[in-house]
Image (cartoon, rainbow, N blue to C red):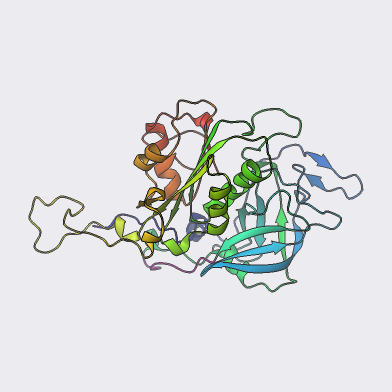
């Protein structure tokens, strides 16, 4: 008996669901809201202080560097005449890959820059190369190649990609430019829950809370899940932050395995063995012992590990931020597309309210 796998290395659900879309169906729809500002000279509208407008804008690839075996960081140019991106912290950008959607048409995906708000003359996007996974004959366990990631990995320096930024791309800011709430500047505690490349918005949060604002005293714990130790992203930066802000920041690595989702028995198991098989022992992940005992958990992020390592729900200013694959949302807080906490989800069971939880 096999449960649906939760695999960090698998493509995001957008690529899986694309197989079910009608050919040439719109790949991204948004609710119309008044622009933050409009440039009278160009007629371009902007959704926030970000210098990328709400209309598609080609930006050149300046350079790329490798993070690990399947992940690179790509540096893109800014629109002409700008020295900083000015994207509100916790904001993301939409990226378009023309004629790359699996159901036909353009593929559009949101990406959060991992560069600091102080980064000049460009911005950095971290992308994992999602390859085809599973068997096409069984859609429940098949994911096609990542539509946008494969397009970007095929680019050369000097090539361009289309970006835009809309109002819906800012879930919660560090603070509003007019000083109005709600932002997360000044909250007492943050629990960050990320899986795989879901670390990107958390990196943006940590840049601002730790490095960029000396008066910020927020305590932060990051619960970070990956399939293998080699899949941990931005490890050097996370380690540096733990050293520099030891009294305020800690990371708990969760290293899982797709085999944890498989329930099986040996042929000679007694009938009362139990499910999953109590006799079956899986080896520790490769290099698991390189992570200090107090900073690691074997398996995926769960209600139990959130209760063990995260901050409690009794502080109303405490914010929990979640980013990962669809199964992460379903287990931890409920579907990404709704603000409500799903009954029976980990955070609901632990007493959190929907006002305390941010789904990226």
Whether 292 is among the magenta residues is no
- The residue depicted at 58 percent of the width and 31 percent of the height is 187
- The residue depicted at 64 percent of the width and 29 percent of the height is 182
The quarter holding residue 37 reads top right
Percent across and percent down for residue 217 are 60, 34
Q: Is residue 10 left or right of residue 299?
A: right
- The residue depicted at 61 percent of the width and 70 percent of the height is 153
The front one of 152 and 351 is: 351
The relative height of residue 247 versus residue 290 in the rendered view (above or below) is: above
Q: Is any part of residue 101 visible from this angle?
A: no
Quadrant for the C terminus in the image: top right
Q: Is any part of residue 297 visible from this angle?
A: yes
- Magenta span: chief secondary structure: loop
Highlighted magenta segment, given as a residue range: 129-137
Q: Is residue 265 left or right of residue 183?
A: left
The quarter holding residue 183 reads top right
Percent across and percent down for residue 307 are 38, 37
Q: Is residue 245 left or right of residue 52?
A: left
Q: Residue furthest right?
A: 41
| Total count of labels | 0
Q: Is residue 157 left or right of residue 130?
A: right
The relative height of residue 222 versus residue 157 in the rendered view (above or below) is: above
The relative height of residue 357 versus residue 199 in the rendered view (above or below) is: above
């Amino acid at each position: 008996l096999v449960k649906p796998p939760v695999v960090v290395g698998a493509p995001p659900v957008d690529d899986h669901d694309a197989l079910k879309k009608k050919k040439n169906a719109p790949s991204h729809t948004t609710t119309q809201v008044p622009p933050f500002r409009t440039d009278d000279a160009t007629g371009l509208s902007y959704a926030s202080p970000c210098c990328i407008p709400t209309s598609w804008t080609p930006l050149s690839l300046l350079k790329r560097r490798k993070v690990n075996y399947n992940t690179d960081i790509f540096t893109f140019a800014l629109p002409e005449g700008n020295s900083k991106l000015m994207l509100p912290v916790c904001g993301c950008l939409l990226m378009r890959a023309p004629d790359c959607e699996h159901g036909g048409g353009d593929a559009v995906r949101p990406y959060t820059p991992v560069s600091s708000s102080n980064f000049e003359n460009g911005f950095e996007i971290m992308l994992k190369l999602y390859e085809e996974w599973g068997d096409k004959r069984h859609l429940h366990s098949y994911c096609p190649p990542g539509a946008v990631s494969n397009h970007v990995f095929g680019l050369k320096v000097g090539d361009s990609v289309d970006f835009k930024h809309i109002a819906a791309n800012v879930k919660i800011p560090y603070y509003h430019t007019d000083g109005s709430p709600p932002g997360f500047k000044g909250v007492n505690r943050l629990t960050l829950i990320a899986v795989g490349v879901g670390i990107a918005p958390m990196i943006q949060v940590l840049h601002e809370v730790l490095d960029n604002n000396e008066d910020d005293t927020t305590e932060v714990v990051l619960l970070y899940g990956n399939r293998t130790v080699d899949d941990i992203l931005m490890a050097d930066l996370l380690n540096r932050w733990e050293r520099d802000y030891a009294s305020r920041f800690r990371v708990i690595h969760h290293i899982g395995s797709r085999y944890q989702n498989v329930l099986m028995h040996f042929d000679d198991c007694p009938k009362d063995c139990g499910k999953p098989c109590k006799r079956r022992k899986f080896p520790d992940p490769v290099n698991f012992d390189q992570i200090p005992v107090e900073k690691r958990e074997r398996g995926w992020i769960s209600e139990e590990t959130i209760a063990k390592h995260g901050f409690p729900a009794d502080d109303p200013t405490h914010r929990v931020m979640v980013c990962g694959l669809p199964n992460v949302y379903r287990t931890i807080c409920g579907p990404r597309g709704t603000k409500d906490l799903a009954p029976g989800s980990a955070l609901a069971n632990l007493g959190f309210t929907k006002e305390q939880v941010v789904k990226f």
